[in-house]
Amino acid sequence: KQDLIVERSNLRRCSQEGKLDVSQMERTLLPVEPDLHSWIRSQDSSGCLSHVQHKCNLLVANCTNVETGSQKSPEVLLIGGAREVRLATMLLELIHFKHQIEMQRFHEHRDQLTERLDRAKQWHSAQNQEVFNVDQSLVGRIIGKKGDNVKEIREKHGVQIWIEDPPKNSTNCRITVSGATEKAVKAARDEMEFITVTIPVESEHVGWILGKGYQTITDIARKTELHHARYDDKARALELCGLRHQVEDAKLLISVHQEYLPVYQDMTRRRMPSRCPSMN
Protein backbone atom coordinates (compact mmCIF):
# COMPACT_ATOMS: atom_id res chain seq x y z
CA LYS A 1 0.00 0.00 0.00
CA GLN A 2 1.16 3.50 -0.75
CA ASP A 3 1.36 5.95 2.11
CA LEU A 4 -0.51 9.23 1.81
CA ILE A 5 0.80 12.51 3.08
CA VAL A 6 -1.87 15.08 4.06
CA GLU A 7 -1.90 18.36 5.88
CA ARG A 8 -2.62 18.19 9.61
CA SER A 9 -5.61 20.50 9.18
CA ASN A 10 -7.20 17.96 6.85
CA LEU A 11 -7.05 15.14 9.34
CA ARG A 12 -10.38 14.11 10.90
CA ARG A 13 -10.53 14.58 14.61
CA CYS A 14 -10.84 11.52 16.76
CA SER A 15 -14.38 10.82 17.90
CA GLN A 16 -15.05 11.64 21.53
CA GLU A 17 -18.10 9.41 21.59
CA GLY A 18 -17.93 6.21 23.53
CA LYS A 19 -17.85 2.94 21.71
CA LEU A 20 -21.28 1.95 20.44
CA ASP A 21 -22.56 -1.05 22.35
CA VAL A 22 -24.91 -2.77 19.94
CA SER A 23 -26.11 -5.11 22.66
CA GLN A 24 -27.70 -2.13 24.45
CA MET A 25 -29.65 -1.01 21.43
CA GLU A 26 -33.40 -1.51 21.18
CA ARG A 27 -35.50 -1.71 18.06
CA THR A 28 -39.16 -0.74 18.33
CA LEU A 29 -41.93 -0.53 15.75
CA LEU A 30 -44.53 2.04 16.78
CA PRO A 31 -48.00 1.57 15.22
CA VAL A 32 -49.67 4.58 13.63
CA GLU A 33 -53.41 5.25 13.94
CA PRO A 34 -55.38 5.00 10.67
CA ASP A 35 -56.32 8.68 10.91
CA LEU A 36 -52.61 9.55 10.61
CA HIS A 37 -51.68 7.25 7.72
CA SER A 38 -51.85 10.01 5.12
CA TRP A 39 -49.82 12.37 7.33
CA ILE A 40 -47.12 9.82 8.20
CA ARG A 41 -46.62 9.15 4.49
CA SER A 42 -46.17 12.87 3.76
CA GLN A 43 -43.02 15.02 3.77
CA ASP A 44 -44.35 16.81 6.85
CA SER A 45 -43.82 13.71 8.99
CA SER A 46 -40.16 13.44 7.88
CA GLY A 47 -39.38 16.70 9.60
CA CYS A 48 -41.22 15.56 12.72
CA LEU A 49 -39.30 12.26 12.89
CA SER A 50 -35.96 14.02 12.32
CA HIS A 51 -36.79 16.32 15.22
CA VAL A 52 -37.59 13.34 17.47
CA GLN A 53 -34.37 11.54 16.42
CA HIS A 54 -32.29 14.60 17.26
CA LYS A 55 -34.03 15.43 20.56
CA CYS A 56 -33.94 11.84 21.84
CA ASN A 57 -30.48 11.01 20.47
CA LEU A 58 -31.71 8.02 18.48
CA LEU A 59 -29.80 6.16 15.82
CA VAL A 60 -32.89 5.74 13.65
CA ALA A 61 -36.35 7.29 13.56
CA ASN A 62 -38.17 6.77 10.29
CA CYS A 63 -41.37 5.33 8.85
CA THR A 64 -41.82 1.93 7.26
CA ASN A 65 -44.37 0.65 4.72
CA VAL A 66 -44.84 4.05 3.12
CA GLU A 67 -44.37 2.84 -0.44
CA THR A 68 -47.25 3.38 -2.85
CA GLY A 69 -49.42 0.29 -3.01
CA SER A 70 -48.09 -1.19 0.23
CA GLN A 71 -50.63 -3.52 1.84
CA LYS A 72 -49.17 -3.11 5.33
CA SER A 73 -50.01 -0.27 7.67
CA PRO A 74 -47.20 2.25 8.19
CA GLU A 75 -45.16 2.04 11.39
CA VAL A 76 -42.45 4.20 12.94
CA LEU A 77 -39.11 2.44 13.41
CA LEU A 78 -37.11 3.59 16.46
CA ILE A 79 -33.59 2.36 17.16
CA GLY A 80 -31.52 3.53 20.09
CA GLY A 81 -30.90 3.04 23.78
CA ALA A 82 -33.76 1.83 25.97
CA ARG A 83 -34.23 5.22 27.62
CA GLU A 84 -33.99 7.06 24.32
CA VAL A 85 -36.55 4.78 22.62
CA ARG A 86 -38.93 5.11 25.56
CA LEU A 87 -38.60 8.91 25.50
CA ALA A 88 -39.14 9.01 21.74
CA THR A 89 -42.24 6.80 22.08
CA MET A 90 -43.74 9.16 24.65
CA LEU A 91 -42.85 12.19 22.56
CA LEU A 92 -44.59 10.72 19.52
CA GLU A 93 -47.65 9.20 21.17
CA LEU A 94 -48.38 11.88 23.77
CA ILE A 95 -47.38 14.96 21.83
CA HIS A 96 -46.87 14.68 18.08
CA PHE A 97 -49.50 12.07 17.22
CA LYS A 98 -52.07 13.65 19.55
CA HIS A 99 -51.66 17.14 18.10
CA GLN A 100 -51.48 15.92 14.54
CA ILE A 101 -54.84 14.15 14.96
CA GLU A 102 -56.40 17.28 16.43
CA MET A 103 -54.97 19.44 13.64
CA GLN A 104 -56.16 17.00 11.00
CA ARG A 105 -59.66 16.90 12.46
CA PHE A 106 -59.69 20.68 12.59
CA HIS A 107 -58.76 20.93 8.91
CA GLU A 108 -61.33 18.28 7.98
CA HIS A 109 -64.02 20.14 9.93
CA ARG A 110 -62.99 23.42 8.29
CA ASP A 111 -63.17 21.80 4.85
CA GLN A 112 -66.64 20.47 5.64
CA LEU A 113 -67.81 23.91 6.76
CA THR A 114 -66.30 25.50 3.66
CA GLU A 115 -68.09 22.97 1.48
CA ARG A 116 -71.38 23.61 3.26
CA LEU A 117 -70.87 27.36 2.89
CA ASP A 118 -70.21 26.96 -0.83
CA ARG A 119 -73.38 24.88 -1.20
CA ALA A 120 -75.35 27.47 0.75
CA LYS A 121 -74.01 30.25 -1.48
CA GLN A 122 -74.98 28.30 -4.58
CA TRP A 123 -78.44 27.68 -3.13
CA HIS A 124 -78.94 31.35 -2.26
CA SER A 125 -77.70 32.50 -5.66
CA ALA A 126 -80.37 30.31 -7.28
CA GLN A 127 -83.11 31.66 -5.00
CA ASN A 128 -85.40 34.63 -5.50
CA GLN A 129 -84.93 37.15 -2.73
CA GLU A 130 -86.71 40.16 -1.29
CA VAL A 131 -85.22 42.49 1.35
CA PHE A 132 -87.20 45.17 3.17
CA ASN A 133 -87.26 47.09 6.45
CA VAL A 134 -89.91 47.30 9.15
CA ASP A 135 -90.03 49.25 12.37
CA GLN A 136 -88.86 47.29 15.40
CA SER A 137 -92.21 47.90 17.13
CA LEU A 138 -93.93 45.80 14.44
CA VAL A 139 -91.60 42.78 14.53
CA GLY A 140 -93.54 41.10 17.33
CA ARG A 141 -96.71 41.25 15.25
CA ILE A 142 -94.88 39.75 12.26
CA ILE A 143 -93.41 36.90 14.30
CA GLY A 144 -96.62 36.20 16.18
CA LYS A 145 -97.15 34.40 19.46
CA LYS A 146 -94.37 31.84 19.93
CA GLY A 147 -93.38 32.42 16.30
CA ASP A 148 -96.64 31.01 14.96
CA ASN A 149 -97.24 33.71 12.35
CA VAL A 150 -93.80 33.66 10.71
CA LYS A 151 -93.82 29.85 10.84
CA GLU A 152 -97.17 29.78 9.04
CA ILE A 153 -95.84 32.14 6.34
CA ARG A 154 -92.74 29.95 5.84
CA GLU A 155 -94.80 26.80 5.44
CA LYS A 156 -97.55 28.41 3.38
CA HIS A 157 -95.22 29.84 0.73
CA GLY A 158 -92.22 27.50 1.08
CA VAL A 159 -89.78 30.31 1.83
CA GLN A 160 -86.95 31.07 4.25
CA ILE A 161 -87.23 34.19 6.42
CA TRP A 162 -84.47 35.97 8.33
CA ILE A 163 -85.22 38.86 10.70
CA GLU A 164 -82.19 40.89 11.79
CA ASP A 165 -81.89 43.09 14.86
CA PRO A 166 -81.78 46.82 14.10
CA PRO A 167 -78.35 48.44 13.77
CA LYS A 168 -77.16 50.91 16.36
CA ASN A 169 -79.09 54.20 16.48
CA SER A 170 -81.88 52.76 14.31
CA THR A 171 -85.30 51.22 14.87
CA ASN A 172 -85.54 49.50 11.48
CA CYS A 173 -85.17 45.73 11.31
CA ARG A 174 -84.15 44.18 8.02
CA ILE A 175 -86.15 41.18 6.83
CA THR A 176 -84.89 38.88 4.07
CA VAL A 177 -87.16 36.42 2.28
CA SER A 178 -85.77 33.72 -0.03
CA GLY A 179 -87.68 31.17 -2.05
CA ALA A 180 -87.76 29.11 -5.22
CA THR A 181 -90.17 31.36 -7.10
CA GLU A 182 -90.62 35.11 -7.37
CA LYS A 183 -94.34 34.72 -6.77
CA ALA A 184 -93.87 32.88 -3.46
CA VAL A 185 -91.31 35.39 -2.20
CA LYS A 186 -93.49 38.37 -3.07
CA ALA A 187 -96.54 36.78 -1.46
CA ALA A 188 -94.60 36.16 1.75
CA ARG A 189 -93.32 39.74 1.73
CA ASP A 190 -96.85 41.09 1.32
CA GLU A 191 -97.86 39.25 4.50
CA MET A 192 -95.06 40.84 6.54
CA GLU A 193 -94.23 44.26 5.14
CA PHE A 194 -96.03 46.97 7.09
CA ILE A 195 -96.31 50.31 5.32
CA THR A 196 -97.43 53.74 6.51
CA VAL A 197 -99.29 56.21 4.30
CA THR A 198 -100.51 59.73 5.01
CA ILE A 199 -103.78 61.01 3.56
CA PRO A 200 -104.39 64.78 3.67
CA VAL A 201 -107.88 65.65 4.93
CA GLU A 202 -109.62 68.96 4.31
CA SER A 203 -110.82 70.59 7.50
CA GLU A 204 -114.50 70.49 6.48
CA HIS A 205 -114.23 66.74 5.86
CA VAL A 206 -112.53 65.74 9.15
CA GLY A 207 -115.71 65.13 11.11
CA TRP A 208 -117.26 63.09 8.32
CA ILE A 209 -114.20 60.83 7.82
CA LEU A 210 -113.47 60.30 11.51
CA GLY A 211 -117.08 59.96 12.57
CA LYS A 212 -118.67 60.76 15.87
CA GLY A 213 -116.27 59.77 18.61
CA TYR A 214 -113.90 58.45 15.89
CA GLN A 215 -116.38 55.63 15.30
CA THR A 216 -116.17 55.64 11.48
CA ILE A 217 -112.37 55.47 11.20
CA THR A 218 -112.24 52.96 14.07
CA ASP A 219 -114.65 50.66 12.25
CA ILE A 220 -112.67 50.94 9.01
CA ALA A 221 -109.39 50.18 10.83
CA ARG A 222 -110.96 47.17 12.54
CA LYS A 223 -112.58 45.76 9.41
CA THR A 224 -109.42 46.08 7.32
CA GLU A 225 -107.20 44.85 10.23
CA LEU A 226 -104.94 47.92 10.16
CA HIS A 227 -102.21 48.19 12.76
CA HIS A 228 -103.42 51.72 13.44
CA ALA A 229 -105.30 54.69 11.95
CA ARG A 230 -104.47 58.09 13.50
CA TYR A 231 -105.46 61.64 12.73
CA ASP A 232 -102.78 64.31 13.13
CA ASP A 233 -104.38 67.67 13.96
CA LYS A 234 -101.25 69.67 13.17
CA ALA A 235 -100.61 68.03 9.82
CA ARG A 236 -104.33 67.77 9.07
CA ALA A 237 -103.71 64.28 7.77
CA LEU A 238 -104.81 60.73 8.46
CA GLU A 239 -102.04 58.16 9.03
CA LEU A 240 -102.72 54.53 8.12
CA CYS A 241 -100.35 51.71 9.06
CA GLY A 242 -100.72 48.06 8.13
CA LEU A 243 -99.86 45.46 5.53
CA ARG A 244 -99.98 46.77 1.99
CA HIS A 245 -103.31 45.15 1.11
CA GLN A 246 -104.82 46.29 4.42
CA VAL A 247 -103.82 49.89 3.79
CA GLU A 248 -105.12 49.74 0.21
CA ASP A 249 -108.44 48.35 1.44
CA ALA A 250 -108.72 51.07 4.08
CA LYS A 251 -107.95 53.81 1.53
CA LEU A 252 -110.68 52.46 -0.73
CA LEU A 253 -113.26 52.44 2.10
CA ILE A 254 -112.31 55.97 3.14
CA SER A 255 -112.51 57.21 -0.45
CA VAL A 256 -115.94 55.70 -1.04
CA HIS A 257 -117.14 56.93 2.35
CA GLN A 258 -115.96 60.44 1.46
CA GLU A 259 -117.93 60.36 -1.80
CA TYR A 260 -121.14 60.08 0.21
CA LEU A 261 -120.53 63.38 2.00
CA PRO A 262 -122.11 65.58 -0.73
CA VAL A 263 -125.07 63.23 -0.85
CA TYR A 264 -125.69 63.50 2.88
CA GLN A 265 -125.16 67.24 2.79
CA ASP A 266 -127.81 67.50 0.06
CA MET A 267 -130.17 65.27 2.02
CA THR A 268 -129.70 67.45 5.08
CA ARG A 269 -130.56 70.58 3.13
CA ARG A 270 -133.64 68.94 1.74
CA ARG A 271 -134.86 67.96 5.19
CA MET A 272 -134.56 71.51 6.52
CA PRO A 273 -138.12 73.01 6.68
CA SER A 274 -138.61 76.09 4.56
CA ARG A 275 -139.81 79.24 6.37
CA CYS A 276 -143.53 79.72 6.34
CA PRO A 277 -144.73 83.14 5.06
CA SER A 278 -145.82 85.48 7.85
CA MET A 279 -149.58 85.97 8.17
CA ASN A 280 -150.98 89.46 8.05
Image (cartoon, rainbow, N blue to C red):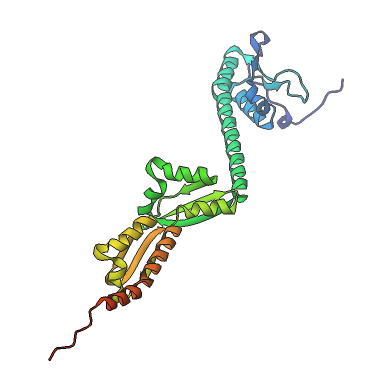
Q: In this view, does 9 lie above or below 25?
A: below
Asked if residue 26 lies left or right of residue 3, the reply is left
Q: Is residue 5 above or below residue 207?
A: above
Where is residue 4? Give x, y as percent: 82, 26
* Residue found farthest to the bottom: 280
Q: Who's the residue at 78% across and 29% down the image?
A: 6
Asked if residue 57 lies left or right of residue 249, the reply is right
Q: Who's the residue at 61% across and 37% down the image?
A: 111
Asked if residue 70 lies left or right of residue 278, the reply is right
> Would residue 158 be seen by someone viewing this image from the given angle?
yes
**Could you say which is closer to the camera, residue 99 or residue 273?**
273
Q: In this view, does 267 lie above or below 38?
A: below
| Quadrant including the N terminus | top right
* Residue found farthest to the top: 23
**Could you say which is closer to the camera, residue 86 or residue 113?**
113
**Could you say which is closer to the camera, residue 249 or residue 162?**
249
Where is residue 243? Give x, y as percent: 43, 57
Q: Who's the residue at 32% across and 68% down the image?
A: 209
* Residue found farthest to the front: 280
**Quadrant of residue 30 within the rendered picture:** top right
* Residue found farthest to the left: 280
Q: Is residue 37 above or below residue 269?
A: above
| Quadrant including the C terminus | bottom left
Q: Who's the residue at 47% across and 43% down the image?
A: 152
> Would residue 226 be seen by someone viewing this image from the given angle?
no
Where is residue 123? Give x, y as percent: 61, 46
Disc count in the image? 0
Where is residue 116? Give x, y as percent: 59, 40
